[in-house]
Image: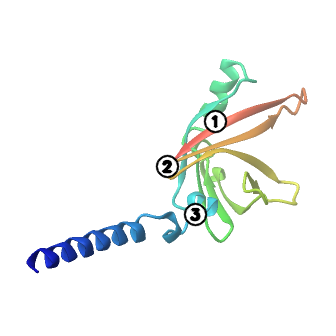
Amino acid sequence: MKQQLLNRFATLSLLAFVALFASCGGKDDEDPKTITDYLSTSKWTMEEMTSDDLDDLSLALYEAFFEGYEITYKADGTYTLNLPLLGEFGSSEGVWELSSDQNVIFHEKGTEDEESYTIKKINGGELHLEFTIEDDESKDSYTVLMKLRH
């Protein structure tokens, strides 16, 4: 009798243990973070720029221009950015939205000031955006990757 009671207790304990882990461990219980959630967690600061299209001197000039660049995306579809090199003229606000496939961020979509940034990497602390710069004189275009952190 004692042995049966012990066996039942062990079986019930094992079932409770299995049920506990089966109910706690699945991703179904968690809401996945959206791209908007990641973007709007906090301010993003430029860490580095790279480009296969630009020579080293041109890339260094762009990096110097964007040094200290910060952007904050808000969940309401607005953003603020700051480009310290330009002083008081380096701060601006605007609207942003994601493409339907959520791979491209548009600033000022549908206006003459529209800009697009392809998301190459995004996670809780890193954001890599690829964009194109066009030289006004030569009309040449250059692809640049901006790496941001928060």
Q: Which residue is mark 2?
A: 125
Q: Quadrant of residue 140?
A: top right
Q: Nearer the viewer, residue 131 or 122?
A: 122
Q: Quadrant of the N terminus?
A: bottom left
Q: Quick one: label 3 or label 2, which is nearer the N terminus? A: 3
Q: Which residue is mark 1?
A: 65
Q: Residues within 10 Å of mark 3 (few under 14, many from 20)?
A: some
Question: How far is mark 3 from mark 2, CA to CA?
Answer: 12 Å
Q: Is residue 59 above or below residue 22?
A: above
Disc 2 on helix, strand or loop? Answer: loop
Residue 141: % across, % down = 84, 31
Q: Nearer the viewer, residue 72 or 37?
A: 37
Q: Name the residue: 56% across, 64% down.
A: 32
Q: Name the residue: 61% across, 47% down.
A: 83
Q: Is residue 4 above or below residue 65?
A: below
Disc 1 on helix, strand or loop? Answer: helix
Q: As shown in the figure, which amino acid type bears the numbered disc 3? A: Asp
Q: As shown in the figure, which amino acid type bears the numbered disc 2? A: Gly
Disc 3 on helix, strand or loop? Answer: helix
Q: As shown in the figure, which amino acid type bears the numbered disc 1? A: Phe
Residue 36: % across, % down = 63, 62
Q: Quadrant of residue 49?
A: top right
Q: Quadrant of residue 54?
A: top right
Can you tell which mark lies on residue 42?
Answer: none
Q: Residues within 10 Å of mark 1 (few under 14, many from 20)?
A: some
Q: Nearer the viewer, residue 93 or 41?
A: 41
Q: Quick one: label 1 or label 3, which is nearer the N terminus? A: 3
Question: How far is mark 1 from mark 2, CA to CA?
Answer: 23 Å
Can you tell which mark lies on residue 37?
Answer: 3
Q: Of discs 1 and 2, which sits in the foreground? A: 2
Q: Quick one: label 1 or label 2, which is nearer the N terminus? A: 1
